[in-house]
Amino acid sequence: MTTQTEYDYIVVGSGAGGGPVAANLAKAGYKVLLLEAGGDPLRDEKGKDTERYTYSVPAFHARATEDKDLRWDFFVKHYSDEKQQQRDSKFSPEHQGILYPRAGTLGGCTAHNAMITVYPHNSDWDKIAEITKDASWNSDNMRKYFERLERCNYLDRPINPNDNPTRHGFDGWLTTNLADPKLVVRDRQLLKVIVKSAIQALAEQGKSLPQVIKIIFQSFLANILAFLKLRQKDPLEFLDTLLDPNDWKITKVSGEGVFSVPLAVKDGKRTGTREYIREIERQFPDKLIVKTHALVTKVLLDKNNTAIGVEYLDGKHIYRADPQADKTENSSQVSRTVFVNREVILSGGAFNTPQILKLSGIGPKEELTTLGIEVRVDLPGVGHNLQDRYEVGVVSEMNQNFSILDNCTFTEPQPAEKINDTCLLEWNRSKSGVYVTNGAVLGIIKKSHKDRTEPDLFIFGLPAFFKGYFLKYSEDIGKYKNYFTWAILKAHTNNTAGSVTLRTTDPRDVPEINFRYFDEGNDVNEQDLLSVVEGVEFVRRLTKRTELFTKAELLPNKNIDEQHEIKQFIKDEAWGHHACGTCKIGHKDDKMAVLDSDFRVYGTQNLRVVDASVFPFIPGFFIVTPIYMISEKASDVILQQARGNRQ
């Protein structure tokens, strides 16, 4: 079935990349069709607004990843070696892989992520500027996109907008906040863990820190000393002086230290691209057309490889990563075709964008030919260069329950069920309390080795059990009230050997995803592995400070002590959830580059990619903020070219 209506732009995917692009183009006066394979998390079957706690309550983000109406479950390979793959305690024999939660809903993964909004390294942008020879990617210029999109609620707006040394934004579409640090006053055990860990982290930095960082820490250190001497009227005041990882002054010097964790939370609720999309749709209903339950199957190309439209399947639960999908040929769906006047923009993410390109005949010639797909553009880089961070958890059992979690169930009540969860009652009443946080109580940014030019470890603590993703993992969040996890995240990984490969030509089928961790990757000197080892050893030094409150280390456990044992634990149990790089930006001389610096697919016209797949190297610590930033940049580039101001 062909839809006669033509649009200026078609955007495929409503996540951190596609959502802002679609909204920005519509706001600029162009007619945009936004196609989303899932539904709307806050609208019922009749399109009526409804509440969904798993979406709105920040502390329910783990539940959101397992909400049947939001989730897409990918089961990925960490290794080609099946024996090594099966050593992971999270391995699913039924699915022959490790759960990798994705979201099939309006807002994409911004509908279920942990809302952490941390600015990337400046070098991430400067590297792209260098390899593409496009100065618009330099870090100073890219900062303006963060300023544009952010609405910072945790700092006072500068009186003079030209005097803004932090370079925060205050008028953007994404609200950022900090959890109230004084929540921990409710829990003496948690407070002691935080304070002692912070002191140890600072002690390890010593005099090697640049003088500028020492100056920034003076207030923090003074408050800790006062706290220890019991001279402060408010013993928690020092928590307000934690470093801001998004402060331009910090990012310029690649600062290490103890940090607050900014969150995308507005009025106590999750906020993301869904809210921006619906707001622009409300303001410009004739310009932004949102079509949910639309699984795009291919890009339509004319004889000159110009994108002229897309084909999509209209129906619910079509894609087979959806646990509600009908795995037979009988699922209810209608094939539709829609055309475009200007451009098609793919924003399906690091797994689905390369899948769509390949099904459209754009990708590695050998792979496409083997499957009988007509090759329109031989681009060997499509689906390659898959990267991710490595993460592991060091989990301890505490002597007693964290009192701050008393009567918190972390569970959405059933319809008409009486709410007995006092934490949820507090959230309903005043949008305050434990549930307005994502659980992270402290962030530590550090170098894994002193000779590194910038930090590569982000370590955060949370009063919960977390060892990665597996089916029903979210049930453990509310089950254990006396566990504390230090999650260790390794940024700027060297391994780029992962891939996304078609299994079949059926667009409903999930592709094969293999990250080729550690030994199977191309990090031949084990730099990534050794960095994570240092993260584990550092956390153990933190937990030694808190051993008076600790009953036992559960993961890795005290018997895993030698370096070779820690290495094996990491190889077995590491996970990630920031997949990127499968349609990388690069110079035209790079045969593995898929996109030019303006997001255009090489060998085509009027076809772009704007999502996590564009990054040649994995950026920063948490990927959502860099994606938001490239979405804003892409909006500028597209509008400049539409108006004739850019080639």
Image (tube, helix red, strand yellow):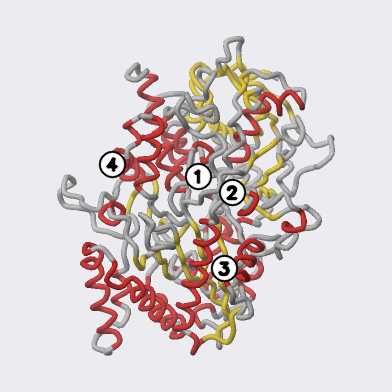
Q: Amino acid at mark 4?
A: Asp
Q: Residue drawn at (64%, 42%), measured in percent from left and top?
A: 46
Front disc: 3 or 2: 3
Secondary structure under tag 2 reads loop
Q: Earlier in the sequence, mark 4 or mark 1?
A: 4
Query: Which residue is disc 4 drawn over?
Result: 140
Please identify the quarter of the rendering in which residue 353 is found.
top right
Alpha carbons under labels 2 and 1: distance apart: 9 Å
Circle 1 Cα neighbour tier, 10 Å, few/some/many (<14 / 14–19 / ≥20) = many
What's the distance in space between the residues labelled 4 and 2, CA to CA?
36 Å
Question: In the image, 473: left or right of 390?
Answer: right
Query: Label 3 is placed on what type of residue?
Result: Gly
Q: Read off the residue under disc 1.
A: 274
Query: What is the x, y in percent for residue 41?
Result: 59, 49
Mark 1 or mark 3: whose residue is earlier in sequence:
1
| SS class, disc 4 | helix
| Tag 4 and tag 3, C-beta contact below 8 Å | no
In the rendered structure, the answer to whether residue 113 lies left or right of residue 451 reads right
Q: Position of residue 582 (x, y in %)?
A: 57, 37
Residue at position x 52%, y 70% from top?
536
Of 600 and 411, nearer the camera is: 600
Of label 4 and label 2, which has the lower sequence position?
Answer: 2
Mark before the other along the chain sequence, 4 or 3: 4
Residue denoted by label 3: 393
Give the residue type that dot 1 points to: Arg
Tag shown at residue 41: 2
Say if 540 sits above or below 524 in the image.
Answer: below
